[in-house]
Amino acid sequence: MILATERLILSELTAEDAPFILELLMSRGFRENIGDRGVRDLDGAKSYIERAQAGYAANGFGLWRCDITATGEAAGLCGLVKRDGLQHPDVGYAFLEAFWGRGYASESAAASLAYGRGTLGLPVIVAITTPANLGSIAVLKKIGLRNAGLMRLPGYDHDSAYFTTEPA
């Protein structure tokens, strides 16, 4: 376990999470709002997990599995990511659609942000989302990030809304 909130437990991904990762990454919401990661089967999900584990080792953080404390059910991912094209780590999250609208993204993202700034001592944390993803934009504003305009990551053909903890 990395973090615990009132309703969630955030933990590093393991190979046993492959079925959950496959379901999440193949979901309509993930593909529309985050993008197609090319994961189509359990082997692809295991490769995704291996990349996440490499990030834990290299950076000391990554995307963590979010389990519902009351049921133990895997609901989504949340955490901090070091992404090419961004100077600072970014907070990211994705939940299965069955768990949307319950505040889990805000709860886990706020905890990840606090962990990054407090425990890890990261001075600046950013976030990106598609400009049309109003739900994600609301989460980022709720946890205290400031909209800093649009930016384009290397290798992408569209702009992303860019948020930061830095003051204006």
Image (spheres, helix red, strand yellow):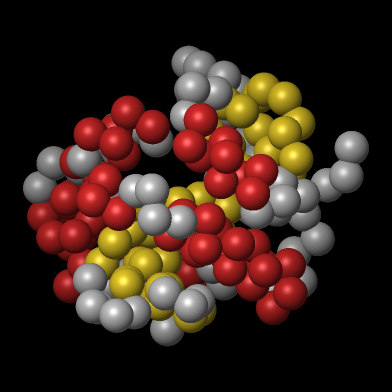
Residue 168 in picture, x, y percent from top left: 89, 37
Is residue 124 left or right of 74 when viewed as pictured? right
Nearest the viewer among 35 and 102 is 102
**Residue 123 vertical placement versus 22 (above, below):** below
Residue 145 appears in the picture as rendered: yes
Residue for point 50% across, 76% down: 5
Q: How many marks?
A: 0
Is residue 43 shown above or below 32? Answer: below
Could you tell me residue 134's position as x and y percent? 51, 30
What percent of the width, then of the height, locates residue 48? Answer: 29, 54
Residue 150 to residue 36: above or below: above
Q: Nearer the viewer, residue 97 or 62?
A: 97
Residue at horizontal 37%, vertical 67%? 66
In the foreground, 97 or 163: 97
Which residue lies at the image location 23% right of the left edge and 78% below the top edge? 71
- Quadrant where the N terminus sits is bottom left
Give residue 87's quadrant in the image: top right
Q: Is residue 59 visible?
A: no
Q: Quadrant of residue 72?
A: bottom left
Check the image and name the residue furthest to the right: 168
Residue in the foreground of this view, choosing between 123 and 97: 97
